[in-house]
Image (tube, helix red, strand yellow):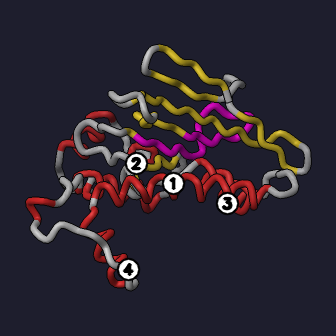
Amino acid sequence: MHVDASGSRVVVKNVELEGLTLTVAGNPLFRLAARYYCELNQASTYLAVEKSTFTVFHFDRTEPILRYDFIRKPKGDVPSAHINMHTESAALIAAMQDAGSNRRTQRRRVAGAPTAAQLHLPLGGPRFRPALEDVLEMLVVELAIDCARGWRESLREGRSLWRDTQLRAAVADNTSAAVEALEELGFVVNWPKTPAERPDLRKDKIEQF
């Protein structure tokens, strides 16, 4: 991966412009492009991911197979974490043609015939979205790409670090739920008795689409 830093902004992306080449039995058959747009918080203590994209391609094609997107502050009604499937299904297209009327369906009708890639399928919001390790393991399991010895342990280690970070953030977002869970397990938590004395909750991140 290549890192570009400018002021408080950091971009992490593949060294190869078209993405990492993935092989099957030694033959290049797929590509995985990953990119993170990050920004330092005001105290310059940690990097927040403003946007990330993981895109899977067949090696000889420019149209993606699928794309995982995260947008920290999405506009409109797009899910903050979502997947776009670039594959067609007669049943899915029929469903999109028969859909009701709102801003999104109206925009699709103006654009012409619907495509599966226009759908944004939610993936758990800012806190519970997939990690790059999840995408890589999916490619190993579902497409049997070549991988080095010890790949599973490496992916599990990376996924564990990612989920630890996300869990800490989720606890900060909803401390009341975290305290309740700990007390149910038998822990004693020094917790202010009155709601006014408790830390502010950031449940908007937990509730975010």
Q: Vertical placement of 134 versus 113: above or below?
A: below
Q: Residue at x 77, y 36 (%)?
A: 21
Q: Are marks 2 and 3 in contact (CB under 8 Å)?
A: no
Q: Earlier in the sequence, mark 3 or mark 4?
A: 3
Q: Is residue 67 magenta?
A: yes
Determine the CA span between mark 4 and mark 1: 30 Å
Q: Which residue is mark 3?
A: 156
Compare marks 1 and 2 and give the one earlier in the sequence.
Answer: 2
Badge 1 amino acid: Pro
Distance, label 2 to label 4, CA atoms, is: 33 Å
Distance between mark 1 and mark 2 Cα atoms: 9 Å
Judged by its main secondary structure, the magenta piece is strand
Residue drawn at x 35%, y 45% as measured from the top left: 80
> Disc 1 vs disc 3: which is toward the camera?
3
Residue under label 4: 187
Name the secondary structure under disc 1: loop
